[in-house]
Image (cartoon, helix red, strand yellow):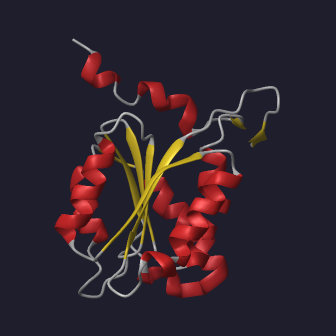
Amino acid sequence: MAGIDLNRTFVPVRIAVLTMSDTRSASEDKSGDLLAKLIGEAGHVVADRKLVRDDASAITAAVEAWIGDPEIDCVITTGGTGFTGRDVTPEAVKPLFEKDIEGFAVLFHMLSYQKVGTSTVQSRACAGVARGTYIFCLPGSPGACRDAWDGILKFQFDARHQPCNFVEIMPRLEEHRKAG
């Protein structure tokens, strides 16, 4: 049965938060603020945080820097997952993925549908793994960030969550590089 096994040890995860916006400044970043708060409340570490414009090369550069940093286990982005002309987060980030986490988008849309109905189709939320780092691309609204964290990520980033979680497989994410 799914749930938290209190006999297991909690392991803090180091998470970087990247906000994409052409219209907000760092002082107006409600989604980034919310994610940082939720990450901290869950016992994890906000390893870094940035805000960049909706520019594919700037987004790719920020995410690449973090996936190259051994002190960062996960990157969560917020913003740029719609399909207007400036929404380029999936195009900037997906080419970095070595493996997609398709189930994240499916589950995110299931949760989102319960809150916003068919409007969930306007999000291209996605996730993957690159160089041993988890990457999650969330919509830019605080509600969507809360749904993703409270409904999926807080459980998957809790090493006590059973029957399985992202934390317990972190040491194996790069085993293909060590083989041979």
Residue 1 can be seen in this image? no
User: In front: 7, or 22?
Assistant: 22
Residue at 60% in and 69% down: 34
Asked whether the viewer can see residue 86, the reply is yes
- Where does the image place residue 150, in percent across and percent down from the top left? 67, 61
Q: Using the image as rendered, state which of residue 101 and residue 59 is in the foreground.
A: 59
Query: Height in image: 162 above or below 126?
Result: above
Q: Quadrant of residue 56?
A: bottom left
Quarter-of-image position of residue 45: top right
Query: Residue 57: x percent and y percent?
Result: 17, 65
Q: Position of residue 113 (x, y in %)?
A: 60, 78
Q: Relative to 6, is 24 on the left or the right?
A: left
| 17 relative position to 81: left or right | right
Residue nearest the viewer, comparing 72 with 82: 72
The residue at the far right in this view is 6
Residue nearest the viewer, comparing 20 with 147 = 20
Q: Residue furthest left?
A: 57
Residue 98 horizontal/vertical position (percent): 27, 43
